[in-house]
């Protein structure tokens, strides 16, 4: 898939933007706070229906305006699709080739992206929520079923947590406990689906990442990625193949711990508490990896995402590199730039083009970004 052109209206610091894009490499050059990342963010929004920089959609709207709109023409499977997303105070509106999508889950996945930003370098040592977000972001782009189940899980979890807080006054009320068990059973059904899907995903992505890490480290470092399930830990099992991994056992386990949940007002077991573990040569990277090794892990992971999404969707995703070249040493820069080929349309933001190989620049468009003004210079 390739984006042919991009249009923005009142998005961040862009009053209006309409640019034709290169099918291979697009380089966005400029000093910080001039709008390079805003263009990357708009493409991400068109793919995932939300920003990766803020939880508040309204922050994407230009100051003083009431709404923003972004659109692109996407060439996919030899067909042109018009992708459009608008945001205002009432919510979002999405269209694909003029057809309105009433649910965001029916919009997300038309355009696939792999984003690599400086924040991603925290995946190894940062909070578990970063690693869960990585998993969910990947799934949303190729599985609308997972997306819908995950939204359902969040709704049921919020419902259960709210009820737990209501039970604090009388935590041993039998009628209340019976209803809590019903809520728990509904939550567990969805939790089991999400856990199974995530375990399968990590197994596949781990194989790709293992090969990439060997390549990046010249065969010196073997990377293993393991899914850490709070359900597995509570049941004292290793994976979903264990006979203890049943709805009945998980519900019983959670009800046995329900008094603690009631006192805390939150659910302690489930996919919302799960995590990933990265291991280099059998040592946990979170504890033992150097900063360089952490960067190699994330780079391996991002390169794996490209191949994984290609395998799942039969299309190469768009690669978004937001100011990461300056975060990598020369060796890792080269490994990343080697992934750029004519099949993968790539967007790079950078304060200078000196880090980009000359042969790549010959097959690219270079845009100078200055305070929301975009000019093609190469």
Image (cartoon, rainbow, N blue to C red):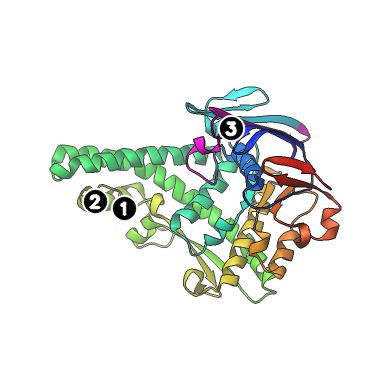
Category of crowding for the residue at label 3, using alpha-carbon neighbours closer than 10 angstroms: few (below 14), some (14–19), many (at least 20): many
Residue 219 pos. (x, y %): 68, 75
Query: Decide: marks 2, 3 in contact (CB < 8 A)?
Result: no
**Relative to 228, does residue 378 appear above or below in the rendering?**
above
Query: Decide: marks 1, 2 in contact (CB < 8 A)?
Result: yes
Q: Secondary structure at mark 3?
A: loop
The label on residue 264 is: 2
Gap in angstroms between the C-alphas marked 2 and 3: 37 Å
| Image position of 290 (left or right of 7) | left
Is residue 186 something one can see in this rendering?
Answer: no
Q: Secondary structure at mark 2?
A: helix
**Relative to 104, does residue 365 appear above or below in the rendering?**
below
Q: Which residues are magenta?
A: 52-79
Find disc 1 in the rendering and name its residue: 268
In front here: 311 or 237? Answer: 311
Residue 200 pos. (x, y %): 53, 53
Find disc 3 in the rendering and name its residue: 107
In front here: 59 or 336? Answer: 59
């Amino acid at each position: 898939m390739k984006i042919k052109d991009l249009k923005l209206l009142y998005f961040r610091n862009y009053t209006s933007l309409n640019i034709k894009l290169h099918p291979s490499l697009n380089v966005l050059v400029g000093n910080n706070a001039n709008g390079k990342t805003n263009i990357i963010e708009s493409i991400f929004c068109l793919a995932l229906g939300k920003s990766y920089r803020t939880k508040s959609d309204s922050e994407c709207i230009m100051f003083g305006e009431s709404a923003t709109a972004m659109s692109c023409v996407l060439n996919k499977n030899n067909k042109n699709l018009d992708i459009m997303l608008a945001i205002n105070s009432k919510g979002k509106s999405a269209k694909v080739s003029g057809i309105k999508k009433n649910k965001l889950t029916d919009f997300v996945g038309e355009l696939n992206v792999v984003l690599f930003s400086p924040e991603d370098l925290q995946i190894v040592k940062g909070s578990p929520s970063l690693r869960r977000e990585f998993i969910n972001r990947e799934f949303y782009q190729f599985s609308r079923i997972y997306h819908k189940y995950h939204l359902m899980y969040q709704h049921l979890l919020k419902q259960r947590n709210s009820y737990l807080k209501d039970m604090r006054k009388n935590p041993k009320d039998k009628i209340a406990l019976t209803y809590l068990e019903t809520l728990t059973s509904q939550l567990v059904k969805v939790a089991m689906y999400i856990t199974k899907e995530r375990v399968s995903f990590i197994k596949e992505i781990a194989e790709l990442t293992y090969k990439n890490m060997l390549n990046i480290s010249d065969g010196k470092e073997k990377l293993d990625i393991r899914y850490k399930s709070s359900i597995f830990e509570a049941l004292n099992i290793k994976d979903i193949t264990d006979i203890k991994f049943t709805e009945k056992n998980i519900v019983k386990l959670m009800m046995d711990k329900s008094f603690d949940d009631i006192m805390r007002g939150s659910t302690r077991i489930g996919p919302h508490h799960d995590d990933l573990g990265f291991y280099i040569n059998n040592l946990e990277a979170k504890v033992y990896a150097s900063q360089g090794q952490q960067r190699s892990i994330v780079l391996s992971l991002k390169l794996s995402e490209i191949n994984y999404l290609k395998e799942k969707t039969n299309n190469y995703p768009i690669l978004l590199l937001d100011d990461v070249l300056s975060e990598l040493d020369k060796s890792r820069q080269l490994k990343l730039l080697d992934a750029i080929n004519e099949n993968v349309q790539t967007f790079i933001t950078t304060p200078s083009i000196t880090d980009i190989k000359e042969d790549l620049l010959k097959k690219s468009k270079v845009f100078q970004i200055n305070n929301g003004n975009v000019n093609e210079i190469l």
